[in-house]
Image: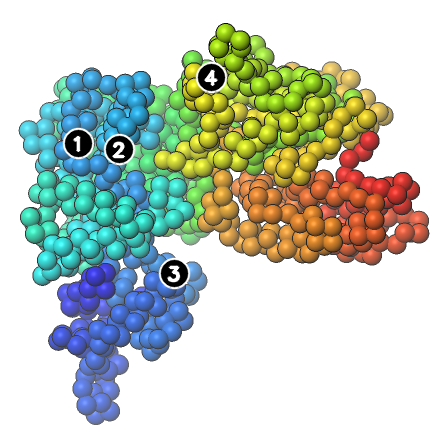
Amino acid sequence: MLERIVLELSKRLKQVKTLSNKKENKITRRDEQGIYVETESSRTKYLRGEKDNSFEFISHKFIIEGWYDFINASKAEANDFKKTRGRSSFLMALFSSLPFVEVSNTGRTNKIYLKEFKTDELPNDQYQNVKLFLDEVIKGTYDPKHLKEHFNGNEYRVKSRSRQDARLLGFIDEFNEINTPLLDTYTQAANKDQLIKGILLNLGYFRVSLICLDLLRDYPKKEKKLAVEELGMLIVRNSRGDNLMVESVAKERTHNLFMWLESTGLIDAEGNPTESFFETLDKKEQLMTSNIRNSLLKVMEEYLGAKRESLGGHLLGSFVRNDIPQRFYQLSFIDSAEYVVTGSVGQGNWASVPWIAIMNRKITISTQRGYYIVYLFSEDMESVYLTLAQGVTETSKEDMLRIKEEIRDSILESSKVRIDHDIHLGTSTKARQYAMSTAAYISYAADNMPSEDVLVADLKEMINIYENFISLKNGYEMITPTPPVVKDKETVYLTYKDLIDHIYAYIESKGFYYEKEEVINLFLSLKTKPFVILSGISGTGKTKMVQWFAESVGANEENGQFALIPIRPDWNDGSDLLGYVDIKGEFKKGPLTKVIERAKENPTLPYFVLLDEMNLARVEYYFSDILSVMESRKWKDGEMVSSNLLSRETAGIDLKLPNNLYIIGTVNMDETTHPFSKKVLDRANTIEFNRVDLGNLDFLKEQEEVESISIGHERLSSKYLHLKDVYQSHQALVERTTEELVKINKSLELINAQVGYRVRDEICFYLAYNEEGSLLDDDEAMDHCILQKILPRIAGSDSRVDQLLRQLYQQFTGKLYEEDQDSYEADLKTARYRNSATKVLEMLRRLRDDGFTSFWIS
């Protein structure tokens, strides 16, 4: 059925302009077999007598073959049209007119690609259920932020679906906070369906569906539904963005979508739109005539007078919040599937600086965070500024200044956009904050407002600057929102680099010396997976490293966010950590269970558990349940969840492993401890602390005091769980890393010590986080991964181990290992993976001297 949308499009269009040179292809007539296209070239040849007709016939079959070429390529340029060469320019231009197809230009190459949506952008529940949910919120029956306090089990899941749809409509935000102005408008609306109708028209997938339904007017409702279902399976991904929507979900969401459209009067009982939604880009531009200029002037002329009146229900407030965004959506380059447009005159009281924001959905949908385009009105209403600015509520001053300079560096000198500090919004705190957040701007005076054409051209230029900066940031650097405050504890947002600098400075201020690279490595290892092992000879500061690391980010024993659990040699099962049922049948909580409960109570803060000397007992015996549950983690409703550690029957509650818990074990390798099995080594990053520099006494000098800060756990938590999670944003990295691991695995086959998928995935996660934060060179980061995830697996005494180590030495240094070589310094100095090569050299020497070798020093 989807093909019929494409064919109906070809029947509706009167002309198509090629993407590269904008040459006209006029569709002069149509029949049951295809369309007749006239170009300037074909018309000239006809007039010269070189052709019998001024047109060329393009069959429906040919168009559909081209369509399949396109969707098979996903992102297609001319060369991807294998079966339809010769008319690829026409077909690309034709397909680009579909409401769910976008055009990109890289240099001289045009590409077309499918827009993508997420299931969250489609209705999850029936329309009447969502209205009932909104009515209950208005009555104060429950707070959407705390649904779990009111509902359990299936009832909670049902209400969660309605809440998701309330978020889709904008009545609540991503933190489930109520959008009071919009909910007040809804409460006062005489026709609530009509108000929701206006919202739906600005939602990308709804608008795409309406245009498609407009194209399918002559088809039965059943076939219309089937076409929209197929469309969903082609362009809608699940909420995490990893897989396309499956058929069962597509059927349910499409059914809900039709119900919403019919209930709001956007389609009739046959599924036909009640007004015409199909329009070319040219028409969209014509609809915009004088709207920006008139809108800006209306606000500037009426705002100061309006401020003397009550804000509640004021017509100017409604105009800014509802009418102006709708006018901007009419512009061809402001697609509601890609951008959110919102206006504000304040909440509760009139704002000193009203604004109209245009936000790329992939960066932010809230003006409190991220960077976006915004029209800022001066307090005296004599000027309005078109700006590229940042959220001032949830962006630190350091991040704001850094991003401001990055944006300014990305703007060409020839641009009319200004990047100085001469923006004057007023004297209020907000006015000064907005001015400080502005990276670039164009100023307009009320008494000298330029023409509509100039305003549109300026906005286009600012959009281009915005999108260019997004692409320069390698795909959407998002300013992560500070999580909701727990127990009035204020958290601080820092970039990865700034956070590392803080942790390093804090540890140094305590009189302990570690290399900065060691701090980075511990940070990346914890972010990759919340279980890390620190090994090394006794007395090298492993325990203190963890303690100061945790304390630097606000986690200490006093506030319960840090716990040190000494391991006893007689532990032989999980009850020593988690708890047990006593002779009276009562559950006695273990030390780890107590920390887990505290972490669950404060899910936005990080909690650290240090298992001190964890291999005094056999780790596989007392820690195996926790390892298994850690591996059970999966995505559910956009959150990472685990299986139960303890069941309700045993502990009185279903105890799961929280995402804000980080477990670090310290180990010594001597005659009093137990070695690790491959099961444990596979599931952890094993970091060695054997470096001892007794001659370095700098730490004894007086150090500047560094205060600890409190961070939200999202700075440490992992956002990748499966390889496909990271592959979408780091495809080249995954492929490059896999290629390197395949080479190493070839050598490891000698002793059957190859790494599996889990190790491969976690190495990719580590390298991706490193790349996102620009913390270490790629080879330095890979060096740590090899040292921590691969070399600990190697042990033995026979010739195969010797051969393996020699091969790895050559792979890491590019040089052959010569046993009688006087010095290996030159090899190590130029080695690609220096730390790993040094460890391999050490293991070779022990094999030669002792007849046995392993990763561990004992």
> Residue at label 2?
161
Colouring chosen for the image of the structure: rainbow
- Whether the residues at callouts 4 and 1 have beta carbons within 8 Å, the answer is no
Q: For numbered disc 2, what is the local secondary structure?
A: helix
Q: CA distance from mark 2 to mark 3?
A: 33 Å
* Precedes in sequence: disc 2 or disc 3: 3
Amino acid under disc 2: Arg
> Residue at label 3?
75
Q: Quadrant of the N terminus?
A: bottom left
Amino acid under disc 1: Asn
Q: CA distance from mark 1 to mark 2?
A: 9 Å
> Would residue 295 be seen by someone viewing this image from the given angle?
no
Q: Residues within 10 Å of mark 4 (few under 14, many from 20)?
A: some
* Foreground disc of the pair 3, 1: 1
Residue 491 locus on image (x, y percent):
47, 21
> Residue at label 1?
129
Q: CA distance from mark 3 to mark 1?
A: 38 Å
Q: For numbered disc 1, what is the local secondary structure?
A: helix
* Precedes in sequence: disc 1 or disc 2: 1
- Name which quarter of the figure residue 99 lies in: bottom left
Q: For numbered disc 3, what is the local secondary structure?
A: strand
Query: Which residue does the image show at 14% across and 55% down from the upper left?
Result: 222
- Whether the residues at callouts 1 and 2 have beta carbons within 8 Å, the answer is yes
> Residue at label 4?
651
Side of 171 where 653 appears, left or right: right
